[in-house]
Image: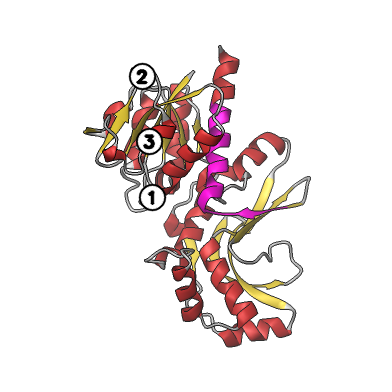
């Protein structure tokens, strides 16, 4: 059995546990669950169905540093789901580094460590013989990294373009079909829980830029930083601009792109029949390769759909470990 620690008991951590109760992953034993206040741990495995919504209300809860559980003495796999910090990557970056140096495999959906230190973390993982997976950092449940790694190994990715933020896509969709102003569409998105209380990272294009950097460094082998991305958000798009686009059979979408080594995020005109022209909270990623030419993946890009990516990565770890025994 692979003994795992879930570090982060927010939306993703709770959603993952709910899914594991419904459909357990064979070969996976959750021995630890931690948040910023402390943790619960059982070497025999935690009874997930008995967990309370607030971790500290469980009788097994202990106050302390969750990072103390990141040890080969306790776990084989770290599932790192703490909140994203794109300034320092912490605390997730330290968690991931500690796990790798301890010989512990890592699955994460935390964009902070991956956008700031992907190449460093991959090198560390190789040197320590551990598996490092981060499918859930881009595109929610869309299997972009695993598809390229497993299905396009003989091909070369030339460029990537995509709609990578569900919040901005919802806002632009409402502006296109209902003629709403940006302010009204944003307010509606916030009321529905589609936008965060502070939606700046989304509407200013920064979240999309983070994902573009991760794609560029992971898939195309670049060494880019967030500061390398030309970024322009959607806050200045008017109903008049949307209307003018509609008259020409087009709409406006926030597109992140990697072309000829250059990274950008900006509103672009897209034809209504283009594969990237998806609506609502959907994401779409177009990959251009040497052999296959064009491939477009479409799916839910956030929320519970991310759990599909996390579980797929967990299966990947278990499969690799089983094969090496």
Give SS at disc 1.
loop
Residue 88 vs residue 252: left or right? left
Q: Earlier in the sequence, mark 3 or mark 2?
A: 2
Residue 82's x, y, as percent? Answer: 37, 44
Task: Report which quarter residue 165 is drawn in.
Answer: bottom right
Q: Which mark is residue 84?
A: 1
Q: Which mark is residue 160?
A: none
Instruction: Name the residue nearer the viewer: 4 or 127.
Output: 4
Give SS at disc 3.
loop
Mark 2 and mark 1: Cα distance apart in space = 28 Å
The answer to whether residue 249 shows anywhere in this view is yes
Q: Residue at x 69, y 66 (%)?
A: 277
Count of marks overlaid on the render = 3
Does 135 sit above or below residue 32? Answer: below
Give SS at disc 2.
loop
Residue 175's x, y, as percent? Answer: 58, 78
Viewer-side label of 1, 3: 3
Residue 283 vs residue 105: left or right? right
Q: Which mark is residue 43?
A: 2
Q: How is the image coloured?
A: secondary structure
């Amino acid at each position: 059995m692979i003994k795992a620690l879930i570090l982060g008991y927010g939306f993703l951590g709770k959603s993952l546990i709910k899914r594991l109760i419904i459909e357990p992953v064979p070969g996976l034993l959750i021995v630890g669950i931690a948040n910023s206040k402390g943790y619960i741990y059982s070497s025999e495995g935690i009874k997930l169905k008995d967990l309370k919504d607030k971790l500290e209300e469980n009788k097994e809860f202990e106050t302390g540093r969750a990072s103390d559980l990141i040890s080969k003495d306790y776990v084989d796999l770290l599932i790192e789901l703490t909140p994203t910090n794109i300034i320092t990557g912490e605390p997730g970056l330290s968690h991931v580094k500690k796990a790798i140096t301890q010989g512990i495999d890592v699955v994460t959906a935390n964009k902070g460590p991956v956008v700031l230190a992907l190449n460093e973390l991959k090198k560390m993982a190789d040197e320590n013989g551990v598996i490092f997976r981060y499918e859930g950092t881009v595109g929610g449940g869309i299997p972009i990294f695993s598809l390229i790694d497993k299905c396009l190994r003989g091909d070369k990715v030339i460029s990537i373009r995509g709609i990578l933020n569900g919040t901005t896509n919802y806002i632009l969709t409402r502006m296109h079909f209902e003629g709403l102003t940006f302010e009204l569409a944003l307010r509606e998105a916030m009321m529905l829980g589609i936008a965060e209380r502070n939606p700046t990272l989304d509407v200013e294009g920064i979240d999309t830029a983070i994902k573009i950097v991760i794609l560029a460094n992971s898939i195309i082998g670049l060494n880019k930083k967030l500061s390398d991305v030309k970024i322009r958000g959607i806050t200045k798009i008017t109903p008049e601009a949307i209307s003018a686009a509609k008259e020409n059979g087009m709409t406006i979408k926030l597109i992140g792109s990697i072309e000829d080594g250059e990274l950008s995020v900006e509103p672009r005109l897209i034809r209504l029949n283009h594969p990237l022209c998806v609506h609502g909270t959907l994401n779409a990623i177009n990959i251009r390769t040497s052999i296959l030419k064009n491939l477009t993946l479409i799916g839910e890009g956030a929320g519970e759909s991310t759990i599909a990516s996390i579980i797929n990565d967990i299966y990947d770890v278990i499969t690799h470990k089983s094969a090496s025994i």
